[in-house]
Image: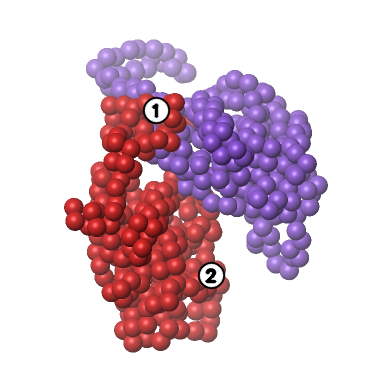
Amino acid sequence: MFSVQTFGDTGKMKDYHYTGPVEHRFSPYAFNGGTVLAVAGEDFAIVASDTRLSEGYSIHSRDSPKCYKLTDTTVIGCSGFHGDCLTLTKIIDARLKMYKHSNNKTMTSGAIAAMLSTILYGRRFFPYYVYNIIGGLDEEGKGAVYSFDPVGSYQRDTYKAGGSASAMLQPLLDNQIGFKNMEGVQHVPLTQDKAVQLVKDVFISAAERDVYTGDALRVCIITKEGIDEQTVALRKD
Amino acid sequence: MALFEVSGFRSYSEVRGRQTHLADRTNHYNFGTKTQEFAVPVGVDPSGFLKTCNHDGGVCIDMNHGTTTLAFKFRHGVIVAVDSRASAGRYLASNDVNKVIEINPYLLGTMSGSAADCQYWERLLAKECRLYRLRNNHRISVAAASKLLCNMMLGYRGMGLSVGSMICGWDKQGPGLYYVDDNGTRLSGRMFSTGCGNGYAYGVIDSGYREDMTVEEAYELGRRGIAHATHRDAYSGGVVNTLYHNKDGWIKVCKEDVSELIHRYRKGMF
């Protein structure tokens, strides 16, 4: 036992006792924050993410968006550990090229989702610490969103939020897009303008209450004409 | 093994002349497309590895989990009923997951435990069943399909997989129902329920089961079992998906929200 004497707030002497060696272990993961959101409409899809990259109490970058364009009709949003996000997107890009060269066509959103599931499961015992959401247009031109867990379980959704503020955003989306917990409301289909406005509002709310979300919002709108990117400022504190 | 030779099953690794292996660095040039590879953390037991990483500077890796599923045989066929909730730690990841995989029009697999494990291995099972059909010109039996899944599980026993699955089907021997889990347990039986809400489901279906039930009564029993289980188990919920399997194949019976079902039971309408 190692004892150290110091002065406390009241001016009296205090004793600190160390109880012995403490084990510190190397963790291969870090949490870099960030929130991602995707919404699917009748003929469009939106993938949005904030651009803050943080670690612990520090902010590494205010301009690190988490949406990555995969093909002309598909965008992926990855949040979690930035190192794994970068490696995973590189692997997906390489696999897309391999497919293009073998099959002479671009991968569809559904195919990319199924492929990502097996890529993630290949690391079942040492997972990629990444929460993925894919947004894009399916073969019929309808909006599609696919959400994943870190080891590859996935399903097709209409809307999904992932990342640090996901628990705050998902209930709001359930209410506004899914009309859950609302009585006597007409279920109007979501228009593109309304969806973009909703996404911006929802991120502004997230930045108010989640420390890891803020700085700026990058919105990618996918339609059959292509991918349109917008940047909106968020709280920088 | 005799079954392996008869079914023509050759694992992917044999065909390619290389063993499936667990690697600490996966083959970058092929990206795992030529052989099936699983990366493992170096020098650590894989099953406990994730628990040690959690809560280290905010790192929290939770996988989708949790379920109640049930299936039972009766005179007119097999009923399968599942809930639709997936939780990741304390967060509800989704309330409308599909937990039944339709392997072919005469074979169904249910999923409980870890969502990713079930989806991956049952999709692999569906691939093997399709290959069997193409090689042997007749459909695989339920016993053989469940044996294939069981052996996949045994290959990774002790590594932390979490799968509780029921393989239901109709083959030349009639209705088939097998329970397969991640320890390699494979049981044939008349009634099974899996998942964290299984105790509640067993209570309900045990008390209402009769071998000579009508088909409508059987639908209702399956629905009730899941509804009551979701009512009491926090990790089950969403909607009840009911399927019915007879000699002509399976059909989807209904998909009902559990809160509405419980509401109706309370009011005594059933």
| Residue A138: x %, y % from top left | 65, 49
Considering depth in this image, is B112 or B188 the residue closer to the camera? B188
| Residue at position x 65%, y 40% in the image | A74
**Residue A232 shows which numbered tag?**
none
Considering depth in this image, is B138 or A235 the residue closer to the camera? B138
**What is the display colour for chain A?**
purple
Residue type (three-letter) at the residue carrying disc 1:
Asn
Which corner quadrant of the image does residue A210 belong to?
A: top right
> Is any part of residue B68 visible from this angle?
no
Label 2 marks a residue whose chain is B
Q: How far apart are labels 2 and 1 at the CA level?
A: 43 Å
| Residue B73: x %, y % from top left | 33, 76
Marks 2/1 in contact by CB < 8 Å: the verdict is: no
Considering depth in this image, is A156 or A24 the residue closer to the camera? A156
- Dot 1 corresponds to which residue? B27
| Residue at position x 37%, y 36% in the image | B35
Residue type (three-letter) at the residue carrying disc 2:
Lys
Considering depth in this image, is A21 or B256 the residue closer to the camera? B256
- Dot 2 corresponds to which residue? B255
The answer to whether B210 is drawn above or below residue A83 in the figure is: below
Q: Neighbour class for label 1 at 10 Å: few (<14), some, many (≥20)?
A: some
Q: Secondary structure at mark 2?
A: strand
The residue most toward the left is: B1
**What is the display colour for chain B?**
red
Q: Relative to A109, is B181 on the left or the right?
A: left
The answer to whether A16 is drawn above or below residue B2 in the figure is: above
| Residue B46: x %, y % from top left | 31, 36
Q: Relative to B218, is A223 on the left or the right?
A: right
Of badges 2 and 1, nearer the viewer stands 1
Label 1 marks a residue whose chain is B
